[in-house]
Image (spheres, grey):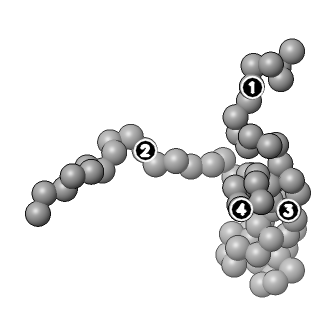
Amino acid sequence: MAITNPRPAEPTLSVVRETVEGACAQCGEHRLQAYPVLSEAGWFDVVKCAACLTDARRTPGPKLGPIELLADRI
């Protein structure tokens, strides 16, 4: 069986995650990370536990997420 959609040669998408001080309220691990996420409600800036993925904090992010319009730079 031939593969009609070959795997891309470029790296996969990733997001920079910043380490945040503190412990997870759910599991107690000290592995909190901050990064943007896209959900059905739009973009959010979240702090999540890397061990159990519980949200420690979730605030609405920019409407276009990581896309920065040139008009916004003025």
Nearer to the camera, 6 or 35 = 6
- Residue 9 visible in the displayed image: yes
Q: Is 33 on the left or on the right of 3, as rendered?
A: right
Q: How crowded is mark 2: few (under 14 residues within 10 Å), some or many (20 or more)?
A: few
Q: Where residue 40 is drawn, which disc sits there?
A: 4
What is the spatial separation of the Cα atoms under label 3 and label 4, in whole angstroms?
14 Å
| Residue with the mark numbered 2 | 11
Residue 31 falls in image quadrant: bottom right
Q: Choose mark 1 or mark 3, whichever is in front.
A: 1
Mark 1–mark 2 distance (CA, rounded to whole Å): 25 Å
Q: Which of marks 3 and 4 is nearer the N terminus?
A: 4
**Disc number for residue 2:** none
Residue wearing tag 1: 69
Q: Quadrant of residue 37?
A: bottom right
SS at mark 4 in the image:
loop
**Label 3: which secondary element:** strand
Of labels 4 and 2, earlier in sequence is 2
Whether residue 13 sits left or right of residue 63 in the image: it is left
